[in-house]
Amino acid sequence: MRHLVATHLHDRRRSVLVWGLALGLWSAFIVSIFPSIEDALSKATEGYPPALKEAFGVSELANVEQYLQAEMLSLIVPLALGYMAVRAVASGLSGAAESGRLDVLLSAPVSRRSLAAASFVATAVELVLVLAVTVAFTALGSALSGAGLSFGSAVAGFANVWPLALLFAGFGVVGTGWSLRTSVVTGSVAGVLASMYVIDLIGRLDSGLSGVRYVSVFKYYGTAIEDGIAPFAFGGVAIAAVVFAALGAWLFDRRDL
Amino acid sequence: MLIPSTAISVGEPCEHGAVPVIETERLTKSYGSARGIDDVTITVEAGEVFGFLGPNGAGKTTTIRTLLDLLHPTSGSARIFGLDSRRESVAIRARLGNLPGDFGYGKGASGREALSLLARLRGMNDVGRAEALAKRFRANLDRPLGELSRGNRQKVGLILATFHEPELLILDEPTSGLDPLMQEEFLTLVGEERERGCAIFISSHELDEVERVCGRVGIVRAGRLIAVERIAELLGKAKRRVRLELVEPADLAELRMLPGVSELKVEGRHASFLIGGDLDQAIKAIARHHVTDVEIAHPTLEEVFLTYYEEGGAG
């Protein structure tokens, strides 16, 4: 399987650079402007409705970690990497079916489950690489601007996105058990991603609807950049991702290609 | 098509009594209400070159994809090397080579990248045979496959299917896109692979090439296998067209009475008719006239195929 993972990563090397650079540069920009807008931010957030601040995880914007959480980690990074994870898995399976590569690979002594597993594992590694690039640029931005971002907090904040994005990779594998069209798989799972975010948002805005948050992975996401990684939530979501990927591999094994 | 300078031995099985390389039993694949294949039963022996003929949509590719476990049979079974095509597909694929009908591997990857991965998946370090085949077929392994013409992509696909010296080659429309010289080289390669002991299953509607390399053919029509015959027997069943030129117009009505004769046309000194089976009686009847020229057209496999196809399954 390592050959398949290595090939998948080789094929996705540009994607790692593009996503890593895009998120890293944007994150570095956010961090680097913090010192110059810090005072104005504190005053501005005082006027925000409490529910709105709760909804977006913005209790205060008193330090760069909170600002990074509000600007990057509460919305942009999880949605972007969730989408990237689905794209990566779908390109490795549905995309391979569309291009004819799957027929060639399945002429060799590999099982369909190995292909699905390799695509999932490669996506997990790809996510780590993108997050590493993002953290590196963010830390660089902080160092250059003197924003004072704690490196450990930044690592925790970004690492916390990994199981969440990986869950959508797992959903993507399930999707390929249902459709071999990349656009269908990506679109469907991206819809689930957006829906989960909205459901969680509604649950946070309206305490009467807080129960709906349990169907959204964002309930278990938290604010690791401030509070550290919650091991049970982190591990639980990661395990759920693996379970969904296993289910997807089973479905992929049973379907016609 | 060019005639090869070296004769290609027709693919007869070289081993007897061994486990068949391919053995299907009433193999059926349905796509809901749409037709796939229905009750296909075939056996291909080691060292045999088996042609699988039929028009587009007849079920050739569905049969191949079911053999390869890309499609799961609705009913019936397929065994390759004596192994179940569904449960033991990984072990089967270790021993076969496959050229898909529309070979593709993504636009960005080169043939060499595909070769490298397949070699690693097969546990091979030496890809010298692939390099030799690339040279022989003048295939460019270094350019991205998306930049290659269909024929050049097909060459790469052929190399990927054969470089590991498989025991079974499954080739779906293998010469599509190849120029005549490369088609010749391909037919020579098929002969060599067969000599090596490889069984070859060729799906094609290029009837001429199948006639030249296959020992037996199966004819598939509307998802059903309507005939499996040795090439020679198949050709023997076909009607041949006989054209005569006589010194003077003659009454040839007696030919009409002979068994197997049809479509008799007489125009002055010229006559033509179709005949199936034994020619002896017709020749003797013709010999009673003063004949200046006679032409007996050897049936092409296409004519044989059309005979089966129109009749809906003789034999």
Image: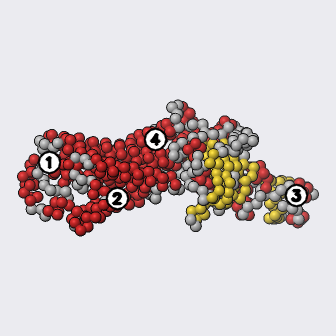
Q: Is residue A118 left or right of residue B22?
A: left
Q: Residue furthest bottom?
A: A208
Q: Residues within 10 Å of mark 3 (few under 14, many from 20)?
A: some
Q: Secondary structure at mark 1?
A: helix
Front position among marks 3 and 1: 1
C-alpha span from label 3 to label 2: 75 Å
- The part of the image, by quadrant, that contains residue A187 is bottom left
Q: Secondary structure at mark 3?
A: helix
- Residue bearing mark 3: B282
Q: Residue at x 34, y 58 (%)?
A: A190
Q: Say which mark, if any, is on residue A190.
A: 2
At label 3, the amino acid type is: Ala
Q: Say which mark, if any, is on residue A1.
A: 4
At label 4, the amino acid type is: Met
- Residue B232 to residue A194: above or below: above
Q: Residue at x 59, y 53 (%)?
A: B66
